[in-house]
Amino acid sequence: MNSEVKNTRNTRKFIVSPSPHFKAPFSVRKVMFVVTIALLPALGGAIYFFGLRSLWLVLIAVATAIGAEFLMNLAFKRPLDSCLDGSAIITGMLLAYNLPPTAPLWMAAVGSAFAIIIVKAMFGGLGHNFMNPALAGRAFLMASWPGKMTSGWILREGLGTTSGINVDAFSGATPLGVVQKIKGIGDVAVAEALNSPETLKALFFGRVGGVLGETSVLLLLIPAVILIVMRVIDWRIPAAYIGTVFLGALLAWVFKGTPVTPWFHLMSGGLMLGALFMATDYSTTPVTPAGQWIFGIGCGILTILIRLWGGYPEGVSYSILLMNVATPLIDKYTRPKILGQRKKRKERK
Amino acid sequence: MITFRGGIHPPEFKHLAENKAIEVMPPPRQVVIPCSQHIGAPAKPVVAVGDEVKVGTLLAEATGMISAPVHSSVAGKVKAIEPWPHPVLPTPVKSIIIEAAGKDELDCAIKPRSEAEIARLSAGKIREIVRDAGIVGLGGAAFPTSVKITPPRGVKIDTLIINGAECEPFLTADDRLMREKPEGIIQGAKILAKVLGLDTAYIAIEHNKPEAIKVMTEAAAKVWPQAEILTIKTKYPQGAEKQLISAILKRDVPRGGLPFMVGVVVQNTGTAYAACEAVTQRKPLYERVVTVTGPAINVPKNLLVRIGTLSTDVAEHCGGLKPNATKFISGGPMMGIAQSTLDVPVIKGTSGMLFLNDKKSLFKIAEEVNCLRCGKCVGVCPMGLVPCEIARMGEYEKLEQAERWGILDCIECGSCAFVCPSGRRLVQWIKYGKTLVFAERSRKKEKK
Ligand code: SF4
Ligand code: SF4
């Protein structure tokens, strides 16, 4: 190109690259690392509430996820080291967090492998999957081994009962399981026990039965708030999701559609884990701000519908999966207005 | 505080040069003055090899409506007229090479106008002066100023904004100019306002320049009390025309349109100062303030540099490069253009010379992985675009879709790529897509 140029004096060459020449030090690896750290308190909680077995479940799920990602990278000729970018670790952790504490260890491996191989890698890997891999893995396990996935709720000895209340009929049930059972009966005494401050306290701190990662509101909320403040995850989806569930539960409570208070609904089941860590998954949620609101509100409505009228006691994971599927459509119809396309604004004086 | 929607807060790095007073760089022994330093038709040389020129002598004249003349920045002899590497254009550009000799003498046409003379100048005459002085937008875009202050027939301009935002990190040239020549800038604003038939102007300064705000406010009170100094929020890209207008006036320039369509003219502070000098001193644009900065230059400075000075000479004057310099950017880090060599000259649009190393991850070229669909780029885009999507459409040449999604509205500010955790080359793919869209358009036009 410069053949016709004479008399130039310099031989020193610099790197030429397109602008910008400035990049926020915020990479995929960092995001994933920070989210992994944020998930650790819940793991600590799981070990404390359910015993050391929780740790093995998580480790097996994570190891399987990394291994599966590695193999799929080999198969699809993708960069091999991306199995360590942290996204597989998070998928493994979240998958394990969705297992009952008594789930056989092989289920952690099977679910995790399904999540990575079928849900993530087959659709193009990082960023291309349209469903949350961990939730899809859980749904797969639910469909294949429903018995193992919906029973075996335990607590470490001396921590109380899994339902959070001392009623023998409900030993070995989760708090929402109890709600589901008394829905038809309308047992006032049990409802009162469920709404007692002790039960709410147990829910908040996590001393109730449930899947590994979901039981302690506290251990999920604090790290999630930190992530939001750090702007790693967006606040819109959790706010819309939790807000909608609260409103729905409030309406239901006022109109006697549910035996428990909205607070109970917020703190029980997988709502916090789902709203804070799974409905905020980047790849499977809308990119537009308006879309994020719609996504959160949609998840909230579905969750409430399933909890109040569905056949399952809990609906968080199916709600999120359904909204995942709707995400491309939501994104398409919630494009922000381009500057100059907005309608006339009120002018400054 | 006054601001626009979206945007980012990159680290500023202004401390490197903001407290360095503007230093006059002595004329170099050779300058290379490209005939094309502006948007529009290149200027046509009116000198021949061997001609003697002085500082400010016309070297090449404007050709056509959108064009600007260029002037000599040294006194000496025209040594050659030949292609030379250019900091903005991709291929070498016809340039006039002048060897400095003898005394650094001004052209005899350069002499001050008296107050009375200035007062008598008509709007048309001032436009002519600005055009003949070769003044172009000094913020970087280099659009001929005389064209900008000549609104099309029937268009009423009701607002003049002098842009002192200087939102690019590292750059401090406008800041220094405002602190050191506030009266000239305000005088220039007054002159430009007069041309547009206005008796007031906004002067917008980001709130990270408190000293400039103070000095300018004082100067305005003295020179032209009708000028209103506005403090605007420090946020990138606050200084982009459409964002500035949206922030200050809450008017949106229509898609694909220009500021005059909403009755606004925006001029950079440096441009206003140049206009003042052209009118009051009869001085053509042959020098400008350039911020020479970055972690890889030994002594960061704000320099008054003659147009055509080679980057080598400027770097030398600033103590030379550090051995670890990896990148040389003409302009700021967000929108500046990476140069492969120090051979390129300083031109009218050169607001800064930035030397980077790869010590900090901020300056490193990020590893690119798949888009995570995190939506961060959408949140920061000041134009309200969905960068991840339009970049993908550009990359895969889905041109019609890209156009519908507003690829041509992108101002290439780089905010999206700055925040992208995946290190996606968003701006690169958007530019690529734009180029294809334009190529397609001109192909269609030819067919018709
Ligand atoms: S910021 Fe990057 S990773 Fe996130 S959506 Fe935009 S392009 Fe994708
Ligand atoms: S899409 Fe264009 S206008 Fe929007 S942030 Fe990216 S570079 Fe800036």
Image (cartoon, rainbow, N blue to C red):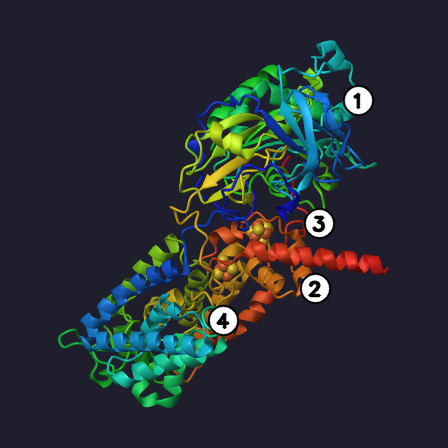
* Residue with the most extreme right position: B448
- Amino acid type at image mark 3: Gly
Q: SS class of the residue under badge 3?
A: loop
The chain identifier of the residue carrying mark 4 reads A
Q: Is mark 3 within 8 Å of ligand 2?
A: no
Q: Quadrant of residue B250?
A: top right
The residue where tag 1 is placed is B125
Residue A3 horizontal/vertical position (percent): 64, 46
Cα–Cα gap, marks 2 and 3: 16 Å
Cα–Cα gap, marks 1 and 4: 61 Å
* Quadrant the C terminus of chain A occupies: top right
Which badge, 3 or 1, comes first in the chain's sequence?
A: 1
Callouts 4 and 3 on one subunit: no
Q: Residue at x 73, y 24 (%)?
A: B58
Q: Residue at x 49, y 76 (%)?
A: A123
- Numbered tag placed on residue A128 in the rendering: 4
Q: Mark 4 near mark 3, Cβ–Cβ under 8 Å? A: no
Q: Residues within 10 Å of mark 2 (few under 14, many from 20)?
A: few
Cα–Cα gap, marks 4 and 3: 32 Å
- Amino acid type at image mark 1: Lys
Q: Is mark 1 within 8 Å of ligand 2?
A: no
* Residue with the most extreme left position: A158
Residue B213 horizontal/vertical position (percent): 51, 26
The residue where tag 3 is placed is B256
Is any atom of residue A136 visible in this view? no
Q: SS class of the residue under badge 1?
A: helix
The chain identifier of the residue carrying mark 1 reads B
- Numbered tag placed on residue A335 in the rendering: none
A160 displayed left or right of A284: left
